[in-house]
Amino acid sequence: MTDFTPISEVGEFGLIDRLRDALGTAPSDDLVHGIGDDAAVVRIGNGRVQVVTTDTLVEGVHFDRSFMSMGLLGAKAIAVNVSDVVAMNAAPRWATVALGLPNNVFVEAVETLYDGIAHACKQYGCTVVGGDITASERFLVSVTVIGEADEDTVILRSGAQPGDLLCVTGDLGSAAAGLKVLLAEKDAFATDDAQPDLRQWSYIVERQLAPHARLDRLQQWREAGVQPHALIDLSDGLASEVHHLCHASGVGARLEAALLPVHAQTFKAAERFDDRPETYALYGGEDYELLFALPEAQAKKLPGDSFAVVGAVTASPDIVIGMPDGATLPLEATGFRHF
Ligand SMILES: [Mg+2]
């Protein structure tokens, strides 16, 4: 008799491990890095590689059409994929877009979605070269982006070394705080006469609806002659991504709660919803900022306002966080869970 395992029992990453086993190994000289990083890396000759990543946004799981416009949805579908290309220190080049469309979606809405896709692609220097459209019960947008880089400049998750600083770009938890505000205002959104006043939340709402991939930071690192040892993008929350980076590198980490960069509106949202701002910063997903490990001497070459140090890589495998009261707590890997 066959035993059936609910996906919730193994989780997204456990399922990926089992599927990798199902595929078996297909050794190829051209494959630099397969499943297990932000994107796969394949050689294309002359010291160049392509990186390949796919990410899907599904209605009811990743977005809500009552507060996500089609244009923003298109732009976000591109940005979240470009973010994974950026997390390899590569430049986005080509994209394909697959759509699953329910029959209550109009042509004009799909055109607006593509306006958003075109706008984002232009911003990141990438071109849509094809795709697929199918009928679907739920609206979904699945994007594949291919990027390019010199093989010796690709940055994996696995290069962090004890003593490296752990740094992040931007601020943390804003997208999660923005989602909380949007969900709280959702009822008001549904009625025509009572549009909610979101001005006081404009920054965090934008972080949720219109995230940007940090391609700008790669340029800055190149100009400063800096190459982090390890790099990952923050799609599932800092706590979860620190675990991914440390496990891949065979190291531990110590974060400091007092160092987490949190925007004033995120603080305000935490106050309003009786949450802790650190909870948003550590466990809130969808910031699409970068987490990277680099030696202190390298960090000194970067503009001080372009990143924040949140902790350090340790030789001990433990992943812990120092709290403002002096306590040291284990940092759980909890991030956004699909199952
Ligand atoms: Mg990623």
Image (spheres, rainbow, N blue to C red):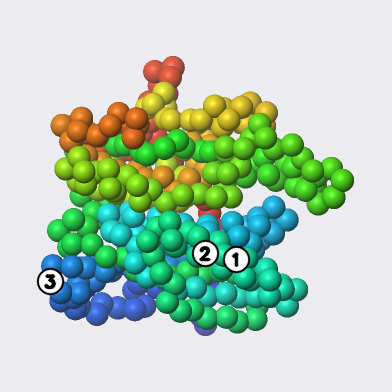
Amino acid under disc 3: Asn
For the residues labelled 1 and 2, say whether their Cβ atoms are less than 8 Å apart.
Answer: yes
Q: Give percent across and percent down for residue 311.
A: 31, 31
In the rendered image, which quarter contains the C terminus? bottom right
Question: Is residue 123 at least partly visible in the picture?
Answer: yes
Disc 3: which residue: 46
Report whether the residue tagged 2 is closer than 8 Å to ligand 1.
no
State the residue in front, 166 or 219. Answer: 219
The 10 Å Cα crowd at callout 1, few under 14, some 14 to 19, many 20 or more, is: many
Amino acid under disc 1: Leu
User: Toward which corner of the image does residue 270 lie, by quadrant?
Assistant: top right
Up the image or down, 247 lies above or below 42; here it is above
Amino acid under disc 2: Ile
Report whether the residue tagged 1 is closer than 8 Å to ligand 1.
no
Q: Give percent across and percent down for residue 231.
A: 29, 49
Disc 1: which residue: 113
User: Disc number at residue 117?
Assistant: 2
